[in-house]
Amino acid sequence: NEQGPKSVAMVLKEEQKIIDMAARAFVAESNTPAEGATVKVITFAEADMELRTDAAGMVNFSLPNGAAYILLVDKEGLVGMHSGVASPQEGKSFTIQQI
């Protein structure tokens, strides 16, 4: 039978939080939505995503909390870029990207 102090070690694994994100692309010259633009989401946390904007120039995507990302937008030779870090403060706050 053991005597003396005993200790127990515990390791808690925090579940990775997923942040729902949105971005809006628009044509700067006319201030109109960039409908049908290609949006590439690049991050080291997950595989790259390639999305198309809707009629309002919007795309929706999800990233792990803390994931650095780059958005590349292209429509008929007009291009734009945005970079950031996924966070609860940034989630669904509509990153606006002119092209």
Image (cartoon, rainbow, N blue to C red):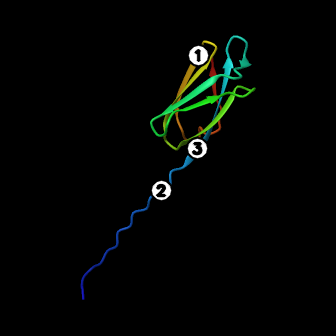
10 Å neighbourhood of mark 2: few (<14), some, or many (≥20)?
Answer: few
Instruction: Provide the residue designation for mark 2.
Output: 14
Determine crowd level at label 3: few under 14, some 14-19, many 20+ residues with C-alpha closer than 10 A. many
Q: CA distance from mark 1 to mark 3?
A: 25 Å
Please report the residue visible at 60 percent of the width from the left and 26 percent of the height from the top: 39
Apparent side of residue 92 relative to residue 68 in the rendered image (left or right): right
Q: Residue 4 sits in which quadrant?
A: bottom left
Q: Amino acid at mark 3?
A: Ile
Q: Nearer the viewer, mark 1 or mark 3?
A: 1
Residue at numbered disc 1: 79
In depth, the one of 6 and 45 nearer the eye is 45
N-term mark: 3 or 2? 2
**SS class, disc 3:** strand
Q: For the N terminus, give its image quadrant.
A: bottom left
5 sits to left or right of 29:
left
**Residue at image x 50%, y 55%?**
15
Q: Nearer the viewer, residue 52 or 26?
A: 52
Callout 1 secondary element: strand
| Residue topped by disc 3 | 19
Quote the CA–CA distance across marks 3 and 2.
Answer: 15 Å
Badge number at residue 63: none
